[in-house]
Image: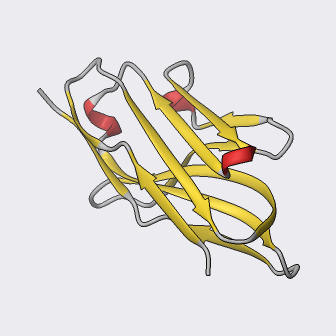
Amino acid sequence: QVQLVESGGGLVQPGGSLRLSCAASASILSIYAMGWYRQAPGKQRELVARITSGGSTNYVDSVKGRFTISRDNAKNTVYLQMNSLKPEDTAVYYCNVDLVLWHGSRGNYWGQGTQVTVSS
């Protein structure tokens, strides 16, 4: 059973910062890509940032220069540092992980979501 536990969401003023964390707990053999998605009310879920096992990253244009994705392979954890937050960043943020379990089964898993609200 894979669990992705997210933390770090909350309410912040425009221009503020938040750091999201997502830790995968299971008997994991290896983790491939890790990413963060978000879904605002009435909108489709979109990819915010993604990081490969080799450390390559990509971002949606709207967050480039403001958000940074990173990972700690020893802790099976992915982070999203969000700076200069804007009201349009308000959404539920979900982590997504592509991994292989100890017995060789590969799967794609989602976190439960954490609310980020940017408002004065």
90 displayed left or right of 50:
left
- Residue 17 as seen in the image, left or right of residue 11: right
Residue 83 position (above or below residue 45): above
Percent x, y for residue 96?
A: 59, 60
Q: Nearer the viewer, residue 67 or 42?
A: 67
In this rendering, the answer to whether 18 lies above or below 115 is above
Residue at 19% from the left image edge and 25% from the top image edge: 13
- Residue 60 position (above or below residue 41): above
Residue extending farthest left: 120
Q: Report the residue at 79% width, 45% height from top.
A: 52
Q: How is the image coloured?
A: secondary structure
Position of the C terminus, as image quadrant, is top left
Image quarter (top left, top right, bottom left or bottom right) of the N terminus: bottom right
The answer to which image quadrant residue 113 occupies is: bottom left
What is the quadrant of residue 28 in the picture?
bottom right
Left or right: residue 8 versus residue 32 is left
Quadrant in the rendering for residue 88: top left
Name which residue lies at 53% across and 64% down.
Answer: 4
Q: Position of residue 49 (x, y in %)?
A: 60, 41
How many numbered callouts?
0
29 or 111: which is nearer to us? 29
